[in-house]
Image (cartoon, rainbow, N blue to C red):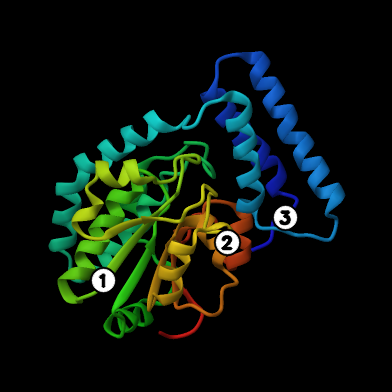
Amino acid sequence: MKAYLDCIPCLIRQALDTVRLSTDDEKIQRITLIQVMNFLINFFQNNPDEVPTPPYIAYHIYRIIKEVTKCEDPYHDIKVKYNEIALNMYPELKNIVENSSDPLLTAIRLAIAGNIVDFGATGGQFDLKATLKEVLTQEFAIYHYDLFCESLKNSRTLLYLGDNAGEIVFDKILIEEILKKHKLKIYYAVKGAPVINDVTIEDAEQVKMNEVAEVITTGCDAPGTILNLCSEEFLKIYNNADMIISKGQGNYETLSEEKKKNIFFLLKAKCVIIARHLKVKVGDIILKKVGSNN
């Protein structure tokens, strides 16, 4: 999905949020933000015909922030906090799934609800409990559940592309539910290094994701899955996977045009641009298949 002009002020707002978490020094904050804006001006002036994805632009912005502020993981404490919040909710969430008429579908709903824990798109302005309550009964705007179930039956390997900390606990519940009915080799992909509140190896260890899946990294710290920046090891698993579950907006933005793989996007539309691209409304929940059959 290409970046639109509306993405530029949003990226600057995200940069400012991150800079303020990275350092209390206002001089460094100012220098960093100036460098970010200079990058954006130079990029679009020098590449007038190039229309990259928003995560590709963000990838460069967050690298600038790291370089200038010398802060490798400004969202570290936030990630730990929301992992703990979600882990404390785990028994209740498992009970909701196990007592529902369709546990797999309920686990999908919970995984999508967890996608609200996003400090990039939402700037941390969200209500997790209210979102959970809403999503459990909300109608899907795009609903490819039958295709999802059929794909699970026909797959031997599943690659699950994680998104945010906290949300990873909801992903684990969905994976647990999948494994109850299907004998699959499941890989769970995290970022190769910290970026915003996206999941890393540390988050996977905190929630013990290795109990249900083999945890791997994309080999990249872009807020999405930019294939030409990912490691060879990740690409081998990606290319050989029978089925891919892609969580969140960043992964949708980078993989929405992918036609060669059997991908299911699970997300909540949290911004106008994403909603417009999906032809849905802001706040809608999505289970969308793209690409070829496995």
Amino acid found under the numbered disc labelled 3: Tyr
| Nearer to us in this view, 171 or 49 | 49
Q: Nearer the viewer, mark 3 or mark 1?
A: 1
Tag 3 near tag 1, CB within 8 Å: no
Q: If the image is split into quadrants, where does the C terminus sit?
A: bottom left
Which label number is shown at residue 185? 1
Q: How far apart are the two marked residues, 2 and 1, measured between alpha carbons?
A: 24 Å
Identified at 27% across, 49% down, the residue is: 169
Secondary element at tag 3: loop
Upstream in the sequence, badge 3 or badge 2? Answer: 3
Residue 65, given in percent of the width and then of the height, sits at 61, 32
| Nearer to us in this view, 125 or 176 | 176
Q: How far apart are the two marked residues, 3 and 2, measured between alpha carbons?
A: 14 Å
Total number of numbered discs in the rendering: 3
Which label number is shown at residue 12? none
Identified at 20% across, 39% down, the residue is: 88
Residue 44, given in percent of the width and then of the height, sits at 81, 49
Upstream in the sequence, badge 2 or badge 1? Answer: 1
Identified at 75% across, 35% down, the residue is: 37
Tag 2 near tag 1, CB within 8 Å: no
Q: Which residue is mark 2?
A: 254
Residue 255, given in percent of the width and then of the height, sits at 55, 66
Secondary element at tag 1: strand
Mark 2, Cα crowd under 10 Å, few <14 / some 14-19 / many 20+, is: many
Q: Which residue is mark 3?
A: 4
- Tell me if residue 158 can be seen: yes
Secondary element at tag 2: helix
Horizontal arrangement in the rendering, residue 146 relative to residue 66 (left or right): left
Quadrant in which residue 25 is drawn: top right
| Nearer to us in this view, 163 or 121 | 163
| Nearer to us in this view, 90 or 55 | 55
